[in-house]
Amino acid sequence: MTMRRIFLAPLVLMLLSIGASAQAAETGTVQAAIPWDGEGRVYQVNPTTIVFMGALEGIIYVESATGDMNEGFVVCPVMQLLDAESGTTQATGHCEITASPNDVLYAKMTCTGEFGGGGCSGDFELTDGEGKFEGISGSGKLTVRSPLGVISKDMSSGAVVRVATGLAQIKDLKYSIP
């Protein structure tokens, strides 16, 4: 083996390892909590069912397995059905989570449950992102606590409702960034 090959082989291996690590996806699992405020309108859609159409806003607090904490601003337009006869609720929403002006996450949330203290449980799915979150994907289990069912059941159709406080928790949010 010539001297040139002796020095070239380690250099090629080092460049290949740098290229491989640059292409490796970042993955992880975090826990998140979103204390939120909500505002929207309620509409009577049949004798026993009302619909809330509005938005939830708050700050997301994210904790990694190593204890690192991060936060961002969240806004989630949502639609929630509340059935007074069965005492059940179901909701869907889409969220924009802003970590910085250039780093934004997008997510979808769905849940079902009971209103009047039972909460709404379902899924939180990361659908895309911008900046350092471009191409992100992942999901976790969602629980939403809200007094909306109790507050809105006696309101007239079209009334504006403002919920001063609620909480969404996302457990074991697994993510992957390409």
Image: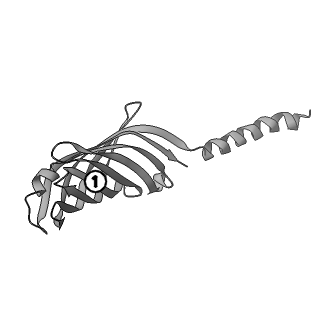
User: 63 or 168: which is nearer to us?
Assistant: 168
Q: In this view, does 88 lie to the left or right of 16?
A: left
Residue 60 picture location, percent across and down: 30, 46
User: 153 or 105: which is nearer to us?
Assistant: 153
> What residue do we see at 24% from left, 52% from top?
89
Residue 13 visible in this rendered orientation of the protein: yes
- Image quadrant assignment for residue 93: bottom left
Find disc 1 in the rendering and name its residue: 90
Residue 110 picture location, percent across and down: 34, 52
> What residue do we see at 35% from left, 52% from top?
109
Q: In this view, does 134 lie to the left or right of 49?
A: right
- Image quadrant assignment for residue 101: bottom left
User: 9 or 49: which is nearer to us?
Assistant: 49
- Image quadrant assignment for residue 119: top left
Say above or below: 174 vs 152: above
Residue 40 picture location, percent across and down: 18, 63
Residue, far bottom: 158
> What residue do we see at 41% from left, 58% from top?
102
**Kind of residue at disc 1:** Gln
Q: How is the image coloured?
A: one colour
Say above or below: 77 vs 4: below
Label tally? 1
Say above or below: 145 vs 94: above
Residue 50 picture location, percent across and down: 18, 61
Quadrant where the N terminus lies? top right
Element assignment for label 1: strand
Crowding at label 1, few (<14), some or many (≥20) Cα neighbours within 10 Å? some
